[in-house]
Image (cartoon, grey):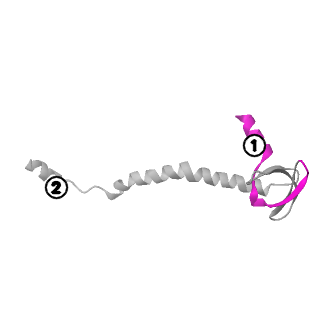
Amino acid sequence: MQDLAFWLQQQPAANPIIGFLPLIFIVAIFYFLVFMPMQRQKKQQASMLAGLQAGNEVVTTGGIVGTVVSVAQDTLIVRVKPDNIKLQITRAAVASLVNQEKALEEKK
C-alpha cells in the first residue's frame, strides 16, 4: 500500500490542457450544430430580402399572403387578394417567398 502511494506521488502532474479538451470539443460541436446553421439561415434571409422585386408573392411574419407591387428602400407595397387591397409593409416583415415554399414542398 505504501508502495502505491509512493508511486502515485512520483507521477508527473497531468497537463492542464488535457483537462480542457472535453470542454473545447463540446464548444466546437455546439458551434457546428447551432451557430453555423443559424448564420447560413440569416444569410439566406438577407439575400431573399435584398432580391425582392415587383411580382414576387410573399408571406409576411403576420401570415398575410400578397404580391409585391412596388419596392422602395425599406418598404414594400403588397397587393392582398380578394379585394386587391394594397398594404405598405417594411422589408423586414417579409418571412418568405411563396414560390420558394412551394418548390421546397415539391422536393420533399
Secondary structure beneath dot 1 equals helix
- The residue carrying pointer 1 sits among few (fewer than 14), some (14 to 19) or many (20 or more) residues within 10 Å by Cα, namely few
Secondary structure beneath dot 2 equals helix
Q: Quadrant of the C terminus?
A: top right
Instruction: Name the residue type under label 2.
Output: Gln
Instruction: Name the residue type under label 1.
Output: Glu
The part of the image, by quadrant, that contains residue 107 is top right
Front: mark 1 or 2: 1
**Label 1–label 2 contact, CB within 8 A:** no
71 within the magenta span: no
Q: Which residues are magenta?
A: 82-108
89 within the magenta span: yes
Residue 2: image location, x then y, percent: 8, 50
In the figure, is residue 14 to the left or right of 34?
Answer: left
**Pick the front one: 72 or 24:** 72
In the figure, is residue 69 to the left or right of 92?
Answer: right
Residue in the picture at 67% in, 55% down: 42
Residue 22: image location, x then y, percent: 39, 51
**Pick the front one: 62 or 28:** 62
Residue 31: image location, x then y, percent: 53, 53
Q: CA distance from mark 1 to mark 2?
A: 66 Å
Q: Is residue 15 above or below residue 106?
A: below
Residue in the picture at 20% in, 53% down: 11
Residue annotated with mark 2: 9
In the figure, is residue 20 to the left or right of 107?
Answer: left
- The residue carrying pointer 2 sits among few (fewer than 14), some (14 to 19) or many (20 or more) residues within 10 Å by Cα, namely few
Q: Residue furthest bottom?
A: 73
Q: Residue furthest left?
A: 2
Residue annotated with mark 1: 101
